[in-house]
Image: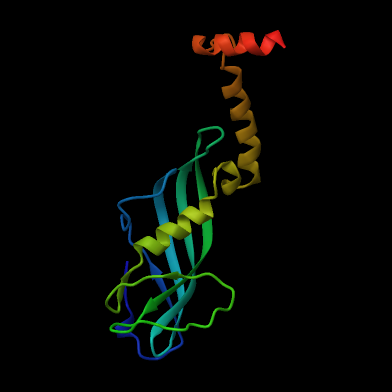
Amino acid sequence: MIVNFGEFSDFPLETTIVAPPGAFSHLPEPISTLEALMVTLAIQQTPGEYFVQGTVEARVQLECQRCLASVTADLTEALNFIVPREGTVPEGRDDDGEEYLEFRAGTEELDLTAPVEQALILALGVRPDCRLAGETEFAECDERTEALLEDINPERVDPRWAALKELRDRK
């Protein structure tokens, strides 16, 4: 997914990019399949840089981190970044309190793979689970998680922990 900012002349502008299947060879864990991906960008130009705001929308298959089931989820995340124009180094940018990634591409072409992957990681959260797929899936997740916990045998304890258990029981 390459964007060539030099191809655009009328700013500000909005554009939408739909990724073809297989556009990403490496997907962030726990995503197993990227079914659809659309990136919507609003691009503004200043004398020294391009300021880009947008959204990443994706339909993914992922593994729930609670019940280990495969679920389909729709992810949406904001995408904000700055690309310095070719041959310029921006100085003294006004800080409006918002944080933006800055990509120093060296040319006016930017591969969107890194910013899109970062947006997907942020949309997943720390421990993605069935909640990303919706409330009905989450109720089923509770049932699957309980079934997994029932299969755990509390008597199977690593013998190396026996000494610690004895110390705890002495108190």
Residue at figure coordinates x 53%, y 37% from the top left: 65
Q: Position of residue 86 (x, y in %)?
A: 29, 82
Of the 4 image quadrants, the one containing the C terminus is top right
* Color theme of the render: rainbow
Q: Is residue 74 visible?
A: no
Residue at figure coordinates x 41%, y 62% from the top left: 116
Q: Is residue 34 visible?
A: yes
Answer with left or right where residue 154 lies relative to residue 108: right
Residue at the far right: name it: 171
Q: What is the count of numbered marks?
A: 0
Question: 93 or 140, which is in the foreground?
Answer: 93
Of the 4 image quadrants, the one containing the N terminus is bottom left
Q: Position of residue 80 (x, y in %)?
A: 49, 71
- State whether residue 62 is above or below residue 36: above
Question: 44 or 144, which is in the foreground?
Answer: 44
Q: Position of residue 45 (x, y in %)?
A: 42, 86
Q: Position of residue 88 (x, y in %)?
A: 32, 84
- State whether residue 58 is above or below residue 5: above
Question: 83 or 79, which is in the foreground?
Answer: 83
Residue at figure coordinates x 54%, y 12% from the top left: 157
Residue at figure coordinates x 44%, y 68% from the top left: 39
